[in-house]
Amino acid sequence: MKVPGLDKIDLRILAALQEDASRSAAEIAEAVGLSQSPCWRRIHRLREEGYISKIVALLDRKKLGLRAQLFVQVKVTSNDQASLAEFAQAIREFPEVMECHVILGMFDFLLRVVTKDMDAYEKFYFETLSRVPNIREVNSFVAATEVKSTTAFPMRR
């Protein structure tokens, strides 16, 4: 993979950080074949340049009791910029919505929603989502089994 402004070592650092960002600069340096100081400087530069937007802990939703995951397609009444922006602003306020994407095709938005169970989703749908102005149609799909889930971008060398 070639990315303008990044060399092979930068890409290896990013790949190593995606695997486990809790490792020290010394551990990352060893994994990518650098000494600690140059590796730390590169990590710092990658953060400053925005290649690393944030470092977070990924939690296990099932262990937290969030057993229902749904993908929800939403069509708004009008595709004008104001309607799309109004929906997008409203949806940002809902902690159950993990992701929201503008999509092309029959629907306008695709949401990934996580709740405790289907009863909690039903409550979220009727008391929160369905009350957002300008919604024309909503289709919800329950994810039965998660086959693959990753946050790591493909960093093929």
Image: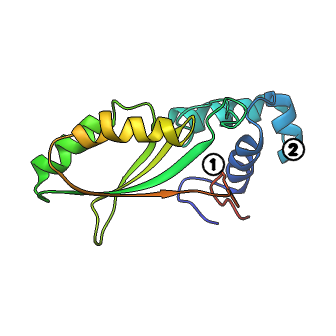
**Residue found 28% across the figure and 71% down from its top:** 106
Nearer to the camera, 44 or 87: 87
Task: Please state which amino acid type lies under the numbered disc 1.
Answer: Thr
Say which quadrant the C terminus sits in.
bottom right
Residue kind at label 2, given as amino acid type: Ala
At a point 89% along the width and 39% down the height, the residue shown is 30
Q: Percent x, y for residue 68? A: 58, 44
The quadrant the N terminus occupies is bottom right
Left or right: where 109 falls relative to 117: left
Q: Secondary structure at mark 2?
A: helix
Q: Is residue 108 above or below residue 117?
A: below
Where in the figure is residue 154, as x and y percent of width and height?
A: 65, 60
Which residue is disc 1 drawn over?
Answer: 151
Which picture quadrant has residue 38? top right
Residue 31: % across, % down: 87, 44
Question: What's the residue at 52%, 43% (across, down)?
Answer: 118
